[in-house]
Amino acid sequence: MKPNMPLVTLLSGVGLGVGVLVVSMLSPSSTASASGYGATSPASATTTATPPPAPATASASESATLPATASATAPATASATAVATAPATAPATAPGTVPGTVPTATASAQKADVPSKADYVAQVNGGGAAVAISVHSGKAVAYVCNGHAVAAWLKGTAAAGKLDLTGKNGARLDVSYRTGKATGSIMADGTKYTFSAPLVHRVSSGHRPPGLYEATGMVDGVPVKAGWVVLPGGGQVGSVEYDPSSAVAPTAQAPVLDLTTGTAQYDGITLVASLISGFTGSGF
Amino acid sequence: MTAQPEASSPAPGDVSLGIGKLVVPSLIGGLVALTLGVYGRLHHPTGAVESIAGFTSAGYAKSWLATVATVFAIVQVISALVMYGKIPRVTAPSWIGTLHKWSGRTAFLVAVPVAVDCLYGLGFQTYSTRVLIHSLLGCAFFGAFTIKMLILPKRGLPGWTLPLAGAVVFTVLVGIWFTSAFWFFSTFGLHR
């Protein structure tokens, strides 16, 4: 009896499918997060100690005079009369006090090394995704995407070289920024992306500068939100979220952002991208 | 009914028996499609399958593989038409059966990795008409293909079953291609 070739074909397909699936499951996102958590972020050690919430009244006096070399004193002491000992190198304290209660105090950190307005972009360690961070006078936005199913926007405050941002689905980050670069990690969609992102230097050559771009539109009656990280070399990584307000927004690859027009064609509509820049304040 | 083609039916009178042979393959095929759909819906899509090599290469790789599968599927239709003598003034060469089998196997095997990547990395999605149709057809394809493979060795089936199954498989595949690779190429260009 001759072998049942159609069945052999079917089973070959099943075998191939299982093989590809196993390879996919073994190889994937762990590469992006494989690098050590604390290794790239000098501040990570301090963040493990979560600060007690400081009294809201403490904020006004401790502005502007953060000494650059202040040692990391306990946040509790900083709260009362802390002009001299405000913990510039204990970044966790500043974000801890901020949400809603500290308007101008930590916003204008005049620590020489910490810019109040800056943009950073980079590929994450190991490649496979890109990150953009914009800081503007105490507020900050971060975006990470892999040009595919991962896209996470995080928003919040920035102070004393430390970001306190949150996003949907447990997205969080541990990032410190300085004049030259922002380093740390972002946790999004179950993957930890570590990076060291240099400051963006604006070079206008008729093209849109590197940085973070956002566009929204409607496709088939569904709102879509696209985000691109345009890298200094001209490369770009972008993802599109469908129904971005939903809990788990389906996410796909973004179309190419035309850097001369600032637009992208997607599913029959034109997305007009706007630059989110901490440096110029656009998008904030 | 007297001039039955000799190939198919040893018992020409009993058509119901022939159709009865379709039940089990159809159930299995339906189960395959349903399983894929349920898996794609329940499994949390990772998107990670392609995050290693680069940002966009996977989309192109998948689109081109899907295109290759579709081209082989077109070979399928043409070779089937030749085998059934449906193309005027063309007599079936001796190798046409081999061509049909191997083009089919190739198309199927090329499509499998694409489907795995879709189901594992993206899942069954419904966020636009195109995506919904693509998800439905993608699952249906492997169900339909399973049915065709299972009924292929059976004898005594009505003569229309294989052409119908083949036509369904082909139509579904072309629909998949139009809602994925064609859309992808027209959105992103043929290469980057």
Image (tube, rainbow, N blue to C red):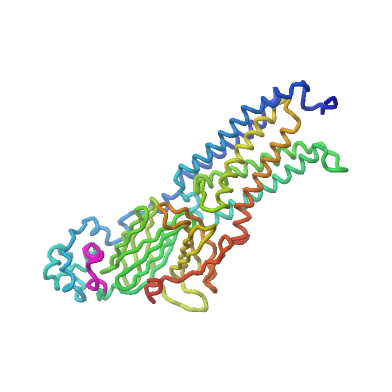
Extreme residue toward the right, this view: B89
Residue A96: in magenta span? yes
Magenta stretch? Answer: A93-107
x 78%, y 23%: residue: B12
Q: Position of residue A177 (x, y in %)?
A: 32, 67
Does any portion of residue B14 appear in the rendered image?
A: yes
The foreground one among A45 and A213 is A213
Q: Is residue A6 above or below residue A38?
A: above
Q: Quadrant of the N terminus of chain B?
A: top right
Q: Is residue B38 above or below residue A274?
A: above
x 14%, y 66%: residue: A79
**Would residue B43 appear left or right of A279 to someone viewing this image?**
right
The foreground one among A97 and A177 is A97
Q: Tell me which secondary structure the magenta stretch mostly adopts.
A: loop
Q: Is residue A199 above or below residue B178?
A: below
Q: Position of residue B101 (x, y in %)?
A: 71, 37
The foreground one among A90 and A150 is A150
Q: Position of residue A261 (x, y in %)?
A: 54, 73
**Would residue B97 appear left or right of A143 to someone viewing this image?**
right
